[in-house]
Amino acid sequence: MNKRLTMASALLLGLCTVASAQDYPARDITNAVVWGAGGGTDVCNRTIMAEMSKVLDVNINVINKTGGVAGSIGMNYVKDQPADGYTLVGLSESNVTSAVQGGFDARFTDVWHPFIVGGSPDVISVIPDSGYDSFAGLVAAAKEKPGEIKACASGAGSIHHLNLLAVEDGTGAKFQFVPYKGSAPCQNAALSGEMTVVVTSVAEQAQLIRGGKLVPLAVLVPDAFEVDGHGSIPSAFDDHPSLADFLPIMQAIGFAVHNDAPDDVKQALGAAFEQAMASDALATFGASNFYVLSGQHGDEAKAVFDSLESQFAWKLSELGAAKYSPEKFGIPKP
């Protein structure tokens, strides 16, 4: 009798587990964003979650879990939650450096199944009186006088710095890189005449471009990019097709779920994500924030983050800014 009851209980538990998985989501979801409220990653996550909640028919509560090394507090918080799809993590490409900087104990895609909304492309701009009116002209000058033209791209090892290095590798130009603690200080340095060249995102430069305080020469993506109030910014690839071997290195802003979450949970989130990305709200968000919308998730998104992690981690290691070697985590060289 006890054996029968045990078997019946096991069967009932199994049926409940299957039903629970098939009914996902059966309750509200939490998305913990690793960066501060009101920032780019936060606003992006609140926008995509609002649209996904309509599809999934549950509330998705967005909270902020900030601090640590490269967003490590928020990532570790979500990592420690059950891998059931009810706690997501809102993140960006910058989080891939957390392991080599000592904040996380694993490779990014060993833990996360990511979804990429998109990001604002980087643009290489100059101050108005620089004397350079084209990307080709700037590159030619930087080749003629290597290391003399001052360029900033926020901090050493940042995505903007990697883009500047990629420009050098793809064109043979050589700039005098000057690091600043963020994009805003870098751009302010250009406005004060300290810098000639600025490499930050279109979103960060947009108001300065519209106001004529920075002159955009080229976006560092394959296609031209439209900025309302200014017009079209050509692609750097137009004059230097060889840049395709090194670029684009794009922002990857979005969210992730545990890799260990059930497959049907990942599929449900993927289907809702695709519908949300196709919405008018996301199109408006992308246009108003100068985003190139991605919509990648699963294996495609993992490949993007693997590439970013490889490039970021090894560059930090080369600069002496990594606490641990990328080899400790099995991160391959780019």
Image (spheres, rainbow, N blue to C red):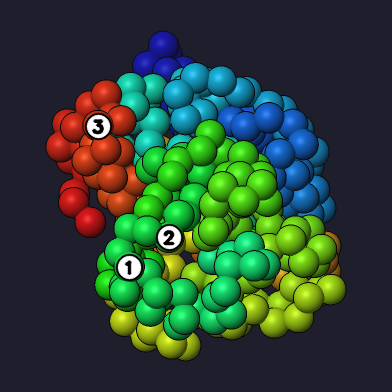
Q: Quadrant of residue 210?
A: bottom right
Q: Which mark is residue 149?
A: 2
**Spatial CA span between label 3 and label 2:** 24 Å
**Sequence order check, earlier mark of 3 and 2:** 2
Q: Nearer the viewer, mark 3 or mark 1?
A: 1
Q: Where is residue 112 shown, x and y percent of the image?
A: 43, 41
The quadrant of the rendering that contains the N terminus is top left
Q: Where is residue 196 shown, x and y percent of the image?
A: 54, 58
Residue 121 in sight here? no
**Sequence order check, earlier mark of 3 and 1:** 1
Q: Is residue 194 left or right of residue 172?
A: right
Tell how many labels.
3
Label 3 crowd bin: few (<14), some (14–19), many (20+), radius 10 Å: few
Residue denoted by label 3: 320
Label 2 crowd bin: few (<14), some (14–19), many (20+), radius 10 Å: some
Residue denoted by label 1: 145
- Local SS, label 2: loop
Q: Which residue type carries mark 3?
A: Gly
Q: Nearer the viewer, residue 173 or 63?
A: 173
Q: Which residue type carries mark 2?
A: Ile
Q: Nearer the viewer, residue 334 or 165?
A: 165
Q: Which residue type carries mark 1?
A: Lys
